[in-house]
Amino acid sequence: MKSPALITVAASVLLCSCASIIGKSDYPLNIASTPSTAHFTIKDKSGTVIHAGTTPEVVTLKSSAGYFTAARYDITFEKDGFTPKTYSVTAGLDGWYFGNILFGGLIGMLIVDPLTGAMYKLPKGVDVPLDAKPQASIDRSLRIIALDEVPASLRSALVRLN
């Protein structure tokens, strides 16, 4: 009869998965902008707003959007005097996922890591530079016109210079 310890070790080896053990499926994402204090909104792949805040902030996001599907987020930054900007963040494969070749086997590679989302990872953060809105040019030229060219509605506001 086989020992319970041997069965436990064998089951652990067969059911484990490298990325699920070493990695994780939720990642803190440091969100920053230059200049800071910009308002940001995070939307998932479906366009649903999942978080809104002000830079700088750390937000925890899932690295997976489903079985064998990496998460993608669109972060829109807005600040008065600056052009709104949208930045996309997409999860990439975690290198530990390939450790399944040695340790997790097919169960880890095809079931555990894809189901838990641990096969993907997100970057540590984003720092988005915002562009200042162009200022409207003001016409500062001097034009001399005859009194009869001034509209009648504006003549009462004229000031005589001596």
Image (cartoon, rainbow, N blue to C red):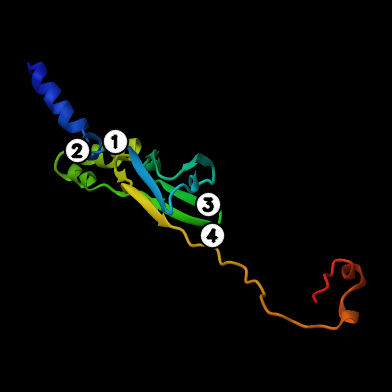
Callout 4: 10 Å neighbours few (<14), some, many (20+)?
few
Q: Name the residue tied to disc 3.
A: 78
Q: CA distance from mark 3 to mark 4?
A: 7 Å
Picture quarter containing residue 136?
bottom right
- Under circle 1, the secondary element is helix
Q: Position of residue 37 (x, y in %)?
A: 46, 47
Res 83 label: 4
Q: CA distance from mark 1 to mark 3?
A: 39 Å
Q: Name the residue tied to disc 1.
A: 112
Picture quarter containing residue 110?
top left
> The disc labelled 1 sits on which kind of residue?
Val
Cβ–Cβ below 8 Å for labels 1 and 2?
yes
Residue shown at the point (9%, 22%) measured from the top left: 6
Callout 1: 10 Å neighbours few (<14), some, many (20+)?
many
Residue shown at the point (36%, 43%) measured from the top left: 29
Location of the N terminus by quadrant is top left
Q: CA distance from mark 2 to mark 3?
A: 44 Å
Q: Earlier in the sequence, mark 4 or mark 1?
A: 4
Callout 3: 10 Å neighbours few (<14), some, many (20+)?
some
Q: Name the residue tied to disc 2.
A: 104
Q: Position of residue 111 (x, y in %)?
A: 30, 37
Q: Is residue 113 left or right of residue 162?
A: left
> The disc labelled 4 sits on which kind of residue?
Thr
Q: Earlier in the sequence, mark 1 or mark 3?
A: 3
Q: Nearer the viewer, mark 2 or mark 3?
A: 3
- Under circle 2, the secondary element is loop
Q: Earlier in the sequence, mark 2 or mark 3?
A: 3
> The disc labelled 2 sits on which kind of residue?
Gly
> The disc labelled 3 sits on which kind of residue?
Glu
**Relative to 162, is 18 above or below?**
above
- Under circle 4, the secondary element is loop
